[in-house]
Image (cartoon, rainbow, N blue to C red):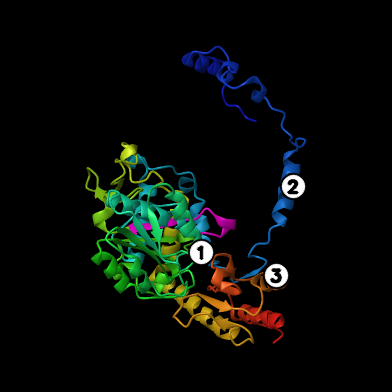
Amino acid sequence: MFLPHTESERKEMLTAIGVDSLEELFTSIPPKYRFPNLNLPPALTEMEVQQVLAEYAADNESLQDMICFLGAGAYNHYIPAAVDSILQRGEFYTAYTPYQPEVSQGTLQAIFDYQSLITALTGMEVSNASHYDGATAVAEAVTMAHAHFRGKRNRVVLSAALNPMYRATVRTYHSGTGIEFVGDDATQDPKSRPDQLAKFIDSNTALVVVQYPDFFGRIFDLTELAKKAHDAGALFAVSTYPIALGMLKPPGDFDADIVTGEGQSLGIPLSFGGPYLGIFTTKKEYVRKMAGRLVGETVDNRGQRAYVLTLTAREQHIRREKATSNICSNQGLMVLAAAVYLSLLGKQGLKQVASLCYQKAHYAAKQITNINGFKLWSGDPFFNEFVVKCPAKIEDINEHLLEHGILGGYDLGQDYPTLRNHMLFAVTEMNSKEEIDYLVNVLKEESHD
């Protein structure tokens, strides 16, 4: 262990706080708990530690070794080499919160560019930078809506087709707050269309939350539902998959008040679950209820372009008890990754990635459902994910696929009792036609087709 302080520095600090020794700092802890015997293995050299960790790492199978058809909120997309190259520059890799604009122009510009790109992608007016992942972004949308109505509206309508992990996170965030969540209980048909949520909207509704494309990959026009929410005086929130917006109408065109999303697909590796990126955008009229930092463009005293934290010196920093939320920042590195990724691809590149995902998924769906016993669950339009009813337990099918080097789809029976033996497949630009055909052949073995 490296202890940077000298003996004289330690004495100076102890004198400043009024104690004579380090031991005095721990007098409030009962003696029997101060120095417990820890069951630790013998110390290892640096070389031995590296060998042990390499053995641990070798137990994990990565997508460098496997073919992946698993999505359900995190996706295997190609990341251009330039993304990582820029991220590893020291000035970005070690950057901290840019409180001092005079020494943080690069970081501030990167955040400003991210916000500009995300608002253009979602069709919204304002973006923060950002939340931890797609789930916490949805939870913060609920927090923001509740604060907007000053707690006078306590009902939140959640679609059953919203990612189950997002819904669980929302309930965890708001446990004990008095908010009533409706629309997604076990009695609701997950196959129902978004418009059917209108029956849950009343004068006590603060927010209606849907997903686009939904958790099952389906695509719906949300205009009517947004109108019904607004007619009741409620806010309307959409959780989205940003790659899909390369070819789909942006949620802002549905008159959404809040648009959130999981930004992992924008140049961020899967990394066994994180760190990820929680996208959060809204209309300008709600900006003062939005948690997080907002970078703006201005000019300095010489008339040159400059960037500043426009709305940061407020409740999150100076009056925390009045804040909508204090969980308001993500790792800036993830924001930068998304900005670099979107800048590299450009409008046409993102559209091409989205088109590849769409076309390959539809080819896969057609081939899979030609196998005896495999049937497409829904006839609704879908993007890059689709649900297939299978002739056997999903656990058994996925085990069989794994034996052939394929990471299979998501077992929907884990979250939806009525969808036992239903699998959610995901296809991205990373899946070649040969890989899809290989998947189909292995599934044929399982079905004895």
Nearer to me, 208 or 320: 208
Please state which amino acid type lies under the numbered disc 3.
Glu
Up/down of 436 relative to 295, above or below: below
Mark 1 Cα-neighbour bin, 10 Å: few <14, some 14–19, many ≥20? some
Q: As drawn, which residue projects farthest toward the right?
A: 42
Q: Which residues are magenta?
A: 268-281
Residue 101: x and y in percent read 33, 42
**Rendered residue at 38%/70% (across/down):** 347
Mark closest to the chain's N terminus, 3 or 2 = 2
Number of the label disc, if any, that sits on residue 206: none
Please state which amino acid type lies under the numbered disc 2.
Val
Q: Relative to 89, is 249 on the left or the right?
A: left
Please state which amino acid type lies under the numbered disc 1.
Gly
Mark closest to the chain's N terminus, 1 or 3 = 1
- Is 275 magenta? The answer is yes
Which image quadrant: the N terminus? top right
- Is disc 1 in contact with disc 3, using a CB cutoff of under 8 Å? no
Number of the label disc, if any, that sits on residue 73: 1
Q: How many marks?
A: 3
The residue tagged 2 is 52
Mark 2 Cα-neighbour bin, 10 Å: few <14, some 14–19, many ≥20? few
Q: Secondary structure at mark 2?
A: helix
Q: Is residue 213 visible?
A: yes
The residue tagged 3 is 399
**Rendered residue at 60%/27% (across/down):** 3
* Separation (CA) of disc 1 from disc 3: 21 Å
Up/down of 95 relative to 135, above or below: above
Residue 278: x and y in percent read 43, 56
* Separation (CA) of disc 3 from disc 2: 28 Å
